[in-house]
Image: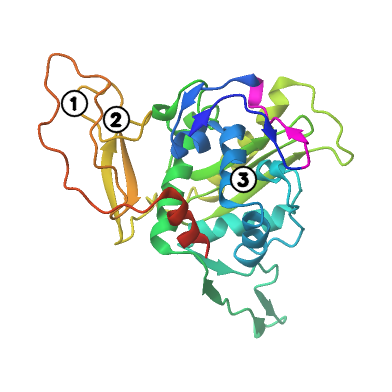
Amino acid sequence: MKSELTSFTFDNGKKYAPHNYNNKYANGDITLAQAIALSDNVYAVKTHLFIGQDTLPETAKEKFGLTTRVKKYPSSALGTSGARVIDMVNAYSIFANGGYKVKPVFITKVEDWSGNVIYEHESKKEQVLDPDLTYVMTHMLTGIFDPKLNDYSTVTGIQIRKDATRPYAGKSGTTNTDNWMIGYSPQLTAGVWTGYDREKEISLVDDKYYAKKIWVHFMEEALKDEPVKNFKPTKGVVGVAVNPHNGLLATEDCPVQRFTYFVKGTEPTEYCHEHLGEKEAPKEKAPEKKKKSWYDKVKDWIF
C-alpha cells in the first residue's frame, strides 16, 4: 500500500486528508510492518476504510473491551475518538497473553490482621483472538524498536531503544496535545499517557518523548528481577528472511534483511530482485502456496 499524501472524497462531498508526522511520506509502497513501526497515518486510514468503518468500532468494543465509543469516522483510525488508559492497556495485554482477554482488577487479595485470606481474586480468561495472528501482530509491534524498518523516517521507538535491555513490543502515538506509549514484554503490559486535562498544546519538542521515556524506565525497573524472555512463536507461524522495504524473500544481495513471521501459508513466495548485482537471482522460486487475500486474513482475525 502506498504512503503518500492522500485526500479522500466521500459520497457526501466531504474531503479528508490525513497527514504524517512532519509531513513525511515514502511516496511509494511500504509494508504493514513498516507502517506500524513508522506510525504512518495515511496507511492506517487507508486500511481502516478498506476493511470498512464499522469494523473498528465493533472490534474495539467486542474483542478488546473499550468502554468509550469509537465513532465511525476515517480519523478514528488515528485515535481521535479518545480512550481510557486502562482500556488501552488491557487491549494490548490481549496481544501479550496470546489472544486471551483478562478483565483488569485492582484488588487481588484481602487478608485480615493475622494473615488469613478473606478474599482472593480468581482470574478468568477468554480466547478472543487467533493465537497465530496474535503472535504475528506482536512481532510487527516489535518493529518500533528495529532500525531495519527505517525508511522515510526512523522507527518511532528509536529514542528509547538504547534503554531497553529485553524484547518489547508496543506502539507510540503523538498529537499536538498529548502522547502515548503502550507496550509489553511476555511478563508485563504497561501504558503511559502524558498531556494536559484541557487539551493544551505540548509546545516543547522534548515533551513528545516523555511518555516513551517514562514507559521504558518503568518497564526496566519493574522487570529487573525477572528473567529476560523472548516472545515465543506459535505452532502455526513460520519465519523467513525478507527485504523489509518490499516484503519479498531476501537474497544475499539485499543490503537489509529482517527475519519476519507469517501465518503458515501466507509467507511471501517471491524473491526480491531489487538489489541483484553480479550474482544471479535464485533460479527456483519457493514452493507455490495458496495465499489468502490481505482482506481475508484481516477478516479471519477479527471475526
Of the residues under marks 1 and 3, which one precedes in the sequence?
A: 3
Q: Quadrant of residue 93?
A: bottom right
Examine the residues drawn in magenta and state their main secondary structure: loop
Relative horizontal placement of residue 249, taking residue 92 as reference (left or right): left
- Compared to residue 99, the image places residue 80 above or below, namely above
The residues tagged by marks 2 and 3 sit, at their Cα atoms, a distance apart of 31 Å
* Residue picked out by circle 3: 49
Residue type of the residue flagged with mark 2: Gln
Residue at the image position 20 percent from the left and 29 percent from the top: 251
Of the residues under marks 2 and 3, which one precedes in the sequence?
A: 3
Q: Which circle, 2 or 3, is nearer the viewer?
A: 3
Residue 13 painted magenta: yes
- Compared to residue 113, the image places residue 154 above or below, namely above
Q: Quadrant of residue 172?
A: top right
* Residue picked out by circle 1: 252
The kind of secondary structure element at disc 2 is loop
Residue at the image position 49 percent from the left and 58 percent from the top: 299
* Residue picked out by circle 2: 257
State the extent of the magenta-drawn residues as a range.
Answer: 12-22
Say if mark 1 contacts mark 3, CB within 8 Å: no
Of the residues under marks 1 and 2, which one precedes in the sequence?
A: 1
- Compared to residue 204, the image places residue 244 above or below, namely below
